[in-house]
Image (tube, rainbow, N blue to C red):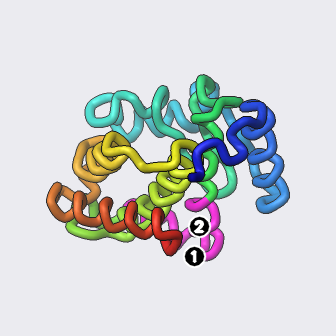
Amino acid sequence: MLRGRNWGKDRVSRFDDMVAELRREFRTFRLVPKERSPVMRVLYRALLMPLWCPDFMASYTTVLGSWVYMPARLIGTDDGYGVLRHERVHMRDCFRTGVLPFAVSYVLLLPAVLTLRSVWEMRGYAETMRVELEREGRISDETLAHVERQFTSSSYLWMCPFPGLVRRWVRRTRDRVVAGVG
């Protein structure tokens, strides 16, 4: 069973170790408390997020290139460690694809059945599932429901507004993660 593997380690040092890994992998990596970022405040207002994603500043981590804008309450925590693992997937995809093509593909064609944004996000959520599997020895139904809501709600601008399709995709992703192939 995977439960407890490396999870006895001090929480802050696990988070700090991930930050150190990100600094080695991305030489321009920066971790910024989201609430203190003028860029994030402007983005929040300019995109009218209070109307469709009011929790953007307090609950969502945002990556722009190699800069991670994370709610301060997550910095240094176990949850923050998991979020950094999710965001590292996005950073890798961004640099592998190219910053501009990644950014354009992330924002185009919303809402739609299957956008590149939904592919990028499912790759990130597969890592979120891996973290939970390592931590708990399983991936909970609550996690699957959370991921489904992210795809089908205003939080991600109805990235894929078909709950049945998303539910099947999320469950297949979980099955691949558990099998160690995804």
Q: Position of residue 42 (x, y in %)?
A: 50, 34
110 or 161: which is nearer to us? 161
Q: Amino acid at mark 2?
A: Cys
Q: Residue at x 35, y 35 (%)?
A: 49
In the figure, is residue 24 to the left or right of 161? right
For the residue labelled by badge 1, is the local secondary structure a helix, a strand or a loop?
Answer: helix
Question: Is there any visible trace of residue 38 in the rendered image?
Answer: no
In the rendered image, residue 34 lying in the magenta stretch gets the answer no
Which residue has dot 2 on it?
94
Q: Residue at x 52, y 43 (%)?
A: 136
Residue sitting nearer the eye, 162 or 69: 162
How many neighbours does mark 2 have within 10 angstroms: few (below 14), some (14-19), or many (20 or more)? many
Q: Is residue 149 left or right of residue 93?
A: left
Name above or below for residue 34 compared with residue 116.
above
Q: CA distance from mark 2 to mark 1?
A: 5 Å
Q: Position of residue 24 (x, y in %)?
A: 84, 58
Badge 1 amino acid:
Thr
SS under mark 2: helix
Range covered by the magenta-colored residues? 89-107
Is residue 92 shown in magenta?
A: yes
Disc assigned to residue 97: 1
- Please tell me which residue is depicted at 33% across the width and 35% down the height of the picture: 53
Q: Pinpoint residue 172: horizontal percent, then vertical percent.
A: 32, 67
